[in-house]
Amino acid sequence: MRNAWRSVVAAALLLGLLAPAQGAEQRDLSGEYVMSGKGVGENDLAYVGTCTLKAVESLYEVSCFNSDTRHTYVGKGIRLGDRLSTVIGDLLKGDHSSVYAGEYLVVYRADADGSLKGRWVHALSGAHGEETLTPKK
């Protein structure tokens, strides 16, 4: 009987340790952000703009406007833990479908202050850099 009781206590402790990790809810990243970033190339200029993230079921819709190039980049993102990975590009609408040009992969880490800090890579050229999204106040 003593071993059975120990097993019950051990199981309860184990469940108590696991339950917060499984049940912990992640902060919704939806919102408006100020974007700032720079490529790592010696001729790359810093850029600024705005980004909007919108949670849709288990994904995020992403729309970022680069104030310097006057381009809007749109795409999708998926969150895993404190990481948000997005694929964005210039949306070109055709007669029958939409395609993306200038596609980028961006992987962000959600910080405690609400900002997202990340790195990006251009799919075709390999150009890459860093970017920060800061929540608009």
Image: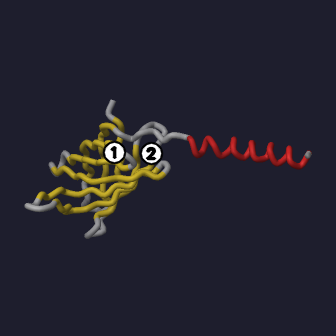
Rendered position, 94 above or below 132 = below
Three-letter amino acid code at disc 1?
A: Val
Q: Dot 2, crowdedness within 10 Å: few (<14), some or many (≥20)?
A: some
Identity of the residue drawn at 36% across and 50% down:
59
Secondary structure of the residue carrying tag 2 is strand
Identity of the residue drawn at 35% across and 43% down:
55
Q: Quadrant of the C terminus?
A: top left
Secondary structure of the residue carrying tag 1 is strand
Q: Residue furthest right?
A: 2
Instruction: Check residue 78 in the rendering and tell me which mark sits there, or answer none.
Output: none
Residue 117 shown left or right of residue 127 in the figure: right
Residue with the mark numbered 2 = 110
Residue 107 in the image, given as x and y percentages of width and height:
39, 55
Query: 72 or 26, which is in the foreground?
Result: 26
Residue with the mark numbered 1 = 56
Identify the image's colour scheme: rainbow, by chain, secondary structure or one colour.
secondary structure
The total of numbered circles placed on residues is 2
Identity of the residue drawn at 27% across and 54% down:
75
